[in-house]
Every structure is written in structure tokens, then in C-alpha cells.
Amino acid sequence: MQITVFNPDIKLSEVTRVGSLAPDGSRPPDSGIHYAAPVRRHFLEQLEENDPTAAFQHSERVGLIGPLGEPQLHVLGPALTFRLGPNPKNLTTADLVQVAGKILTRTGPDLTQIPVVKETRVESGQFLLLSVLCMLFILVVLAASTTFFCVRQRSHLRMKEKLASLGTDTSTDATATYQELCRQRMASRTSERVERPETLRHSRLNSVSSQFSDGPAASPSTRSSTSSWCEEPVPSNMDISTGHMILSYMEDHLKNKNRLEREWEALCSYQAEPSACGVGHGEQNSKRNRSEAVVAYDHSRITLKAENNHGNSDYINASPIMDHDPRNPTYISSQGPLPTTVADFWQMVWESGCVVVVMLTPLSENGVKQCHRYWPDEGSDIYHIYEVNLVSEHIWCEDFLVRSFYLKNLQTNETRTVTQFHFLSWMDRGIPNSARTLLDFRRKVNKCYRGRSCPIIVHCSDGAGRSGTYVLIDMVLNRLAKGAKEIDIAATLEHLRDQRAGMVQTKVRSPRL
């Protein structure tokens, strides 16, 4: 507590508060309660004689208050200021308020006024807590702002990268071209095909079947025909960026007409490493090859279980084709079975767990054998330890048909259903009559295969030309469907040739998407 006593001749409005001095002579922050009272002139004389404590010592003697401890006193002009500190009697501010009048009366001056300055206490702890809370709030706001800024920046960067992946050509012409392609695609899906006369359709189907068969022509009643394949909706998961990428690829090939020629010349000089075919060219196995030009690599060939083979051999001219997983082949590219290797073919089907076979060649072309019939024309046949039953045969269109087989292992009595997709209108060293027909054929195969983890067996005559083209097309389209951002057919074909020799034998078969 601080008390200030000043000259009564000085007006109260002219009196300024006098703060007490700290022991080191500095002025502490203004706090506590101040008291002011007029004094007579003779009391001022006591102050001027540098005896500022006289009045208060007298008060102590008369017993009004106890010892003030070591009061902090300060004289400034006619004013005397002191602070009440710790004292033996534990006097408080309330005690001095009660005896303030008595102090001034007993010491001589008459009490006329005691202006009390209101107490203003500010706890330093409250200031500290408030400051900490403010700082924490500011830090939280700054952290939130920084996080929001970083998220927006990252979003902008991703958007820029996505736009960059669409290619530099974002002109109106490219967009219009893509939209036109989409409209044409939708129109082709929703348009109704004109039905042909049923008699003409049956006659054409029978002529196609007899043309590519080495056996007697079957009557129309033994085969079923349906046209539902062309009416099924074609699901499209292609996003806009993939569409732009394909358009850019097509435009580049249209502008650089010699690019395909240069790529093919580079592929013709490509040599796979390793490329040894010692096993296939061996004395016992060479007779199992349809063509000496296409033989399975030693490091990449299907190995049969010799103990289950009718010739105690593990060789068949077929190669596993990997895509992204080197442990599990996606395809098996095989030559068309010879009369002596039909049992080997069904053994490969059984041991590989295959349920889908893609056949891309007729049984004969222009009187030249392309593949031996490895299934019964009707009923069932036994090939070594495998019994094959023809369950059904459906002609989906003029260009391909579908057969369903019931395969049984006679040693274990296990059974399995195998579906064969037979494409009829693809001649050796040629191309299909219609690219759309081949793509519809592929779609039908993939619909049957969907959800399987076993490889698809693909074969033509030698297992390289038409088989390689089909595998290349299917692999590239599957990659695009999974979100690939580039088309590199040449690199994909090199990947195939690393696994089987002679894949895609002519430039005209190189797919142009």
C-alpha cells in the first residue's frame, strides 16, 4: 500500500500521484492503494527538515499502528509517499484505511479530505495465460493457413501434370475429332442391324464352316446360331486423357507415314537374348515341331510332366507369355497340334489350368494343313489319359464360333469345362477381313475369361504369326484399359519376341490403333 501526504495549500487537482521507490532506487510499477490528506504548514516544515518519518514514528508511539517494518519512503516537494511492506503485525490495506484518519489527527493536522484512489490489481499470471492463449491461437491459424496453402499448391501441380499428360495439342480440332469419334461409337452401339433372310444366313454359315473344316460338313441342325453377340453393349472405361493420348498417337502416325516402316525395320534386326532352342531342335523333339523356324526358347517353354506323357517327354512347342507378372503367364502361345501331339496339347491344357483356348486358324487353307482337329466332331474322344466331350458348338457370326468341351482326367476322374473360341476368317500371312470383327471376337473371349487367373492358350498354325498379333493387340488394349499413358507397340513386340521367336511375322499385321 502506498500513502501520499501533500501540502494543504496545493489544490487537489494539482496533486499528482507519487510512486514509491524500490530499494535499488528504481520506480516499480504503479500498484496498490494511495491515500492523500492535507497537512498543516508546520507538518510541511518537518518534511523540509528531511525528517519524513517523524509523523509516522509518532503514530507508532501512540499505538495507533504497529511498526511499519521497513517502509519505503519518498519525499517529492510537499508530498510524502510510503509503501506498506511485510510487517510483524501483518497490517493490511484495510487496517490502514480504518486508522488513516486517526493517524493524521494525532500527528497534528486536521483531517479535511481523504481521496482514495481505486485499487487496480492486475495479476501477472492472468496476463501470462492470456498471452499464451493468444500465441497458441495465432500458431494454430498459421498452421491451418500453411496446410491449406500446401494442399492447394499440390492440387494445382497435379492438375498441371494431368493436363501435360494430355499432350501439347489441346486445340479445338483435336477435341472436336474426339467428340465425333465418341458420337460415332455411340451411334454404332445403338443402331439396329438389318436382319438377313434366315435361309441365306444358314447357307453362308454352312459354307464358311465347310470351307475351314477338314471333315464332312455338318447339317444345320447340329449347330446353333445366334446374333446376340453384336447386340451386347460394349462397356467403355476409357477416360478423356486416354482418348486424347490415342488421338495424338493416331495423328502422329498420319503425319509421319514412314514411322511404321522405320519401326518395322528396327524390329526385323532385333535379336532376343538368350535365344537358344537346343531342346526344341533335339532329335527326339524336332518331329514335334510344325515349323523349324518357330521353336520354343530353352529358357521360355512350357514343360510337361514326363511321367504323365504318352511319350515320356516334357516337350511341347509352346511358350508362356508374361505381361506384368513374371511369375504367372498371361498367355500361352502354342503351335497348332500335329496328329502326334494332340495328347500333348490336352495335357498342357490340363496342367496349366487353362479354361479358354483361342484358335486363330482354320484346319486347312487352300488344301494345306494348318492344324489337326484336336476335338471330337461330335460325342467324345480319348487322347491318352484325357477324355474330351463336345458339349456344344455355337456359331456367333460368319467369322467365328464357340465350342464348349467337357475335359476329364481319366487317372484322377477330375473334370473341367474348357471353352474354345475359333476365329475363321484370318488367313495365314494375311489380316482379318474386318478389324471390328476381330475386336468383337476379343471382347467375347475376355468376357468368358473375366475373373480367371490361369493363362489363355492362343494358337494358330505355328503359334507366332496370327497368335503373336492377337496377343499384342490384347496386351496393348488391356494396358490402355488399366490407365497406361503411352502407346509403344514396338517395345511391346520386342517384349513378346524375348519370350517366343517370330511373334508377328509381317508388317501388315502390326496393329494400328
Image (cartoon, rainbow, N blue to C red):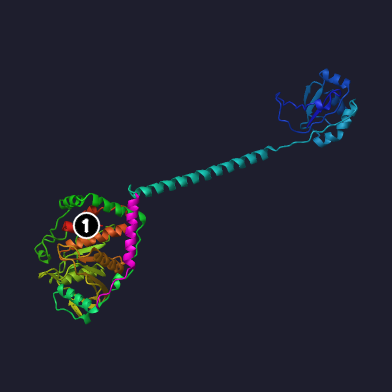
Where in the figure is residue 458, as x and y percent of width and height? 21, 65
Q: Is 471 in front, or is 164?
A: 164
Position of residue 412 relative to residue 138, above or below, is below
Q: Quadrant of residue 361?
A: bottom left
Q: Is 281 in front, or is 331?
A: 331
Quadrant placement of the C terminus: bottom left
Q: Is residue 464 visible?
A: no
Asked whether residue 379 is drawn in magenta, I would say no
Kindly identify the amino acid type of the residue bearing the numbered disc 1.
Leu
Where in the figure is residue 285, as x and y percent of width and height? 11, 64
Q: Is residue 40 visible?
A: yes
Quadrant placement of the N terminus: top right
- What secondary structure is marked by label 1? helix
Where in the figure is residue 53, as x and y percent of width and height? 82, 23
Q: Is residue 173 left or right of residue 146?
A: left
Q: Residues within 10 Å of mark 1 (few under 14, many from 20)?
A: many
Q: Which residue is mark 1?
A: 496
Query: Which residues are the magenta region?
Result: 171-197
Q: Quadrant of residue 199?
A: bottom left
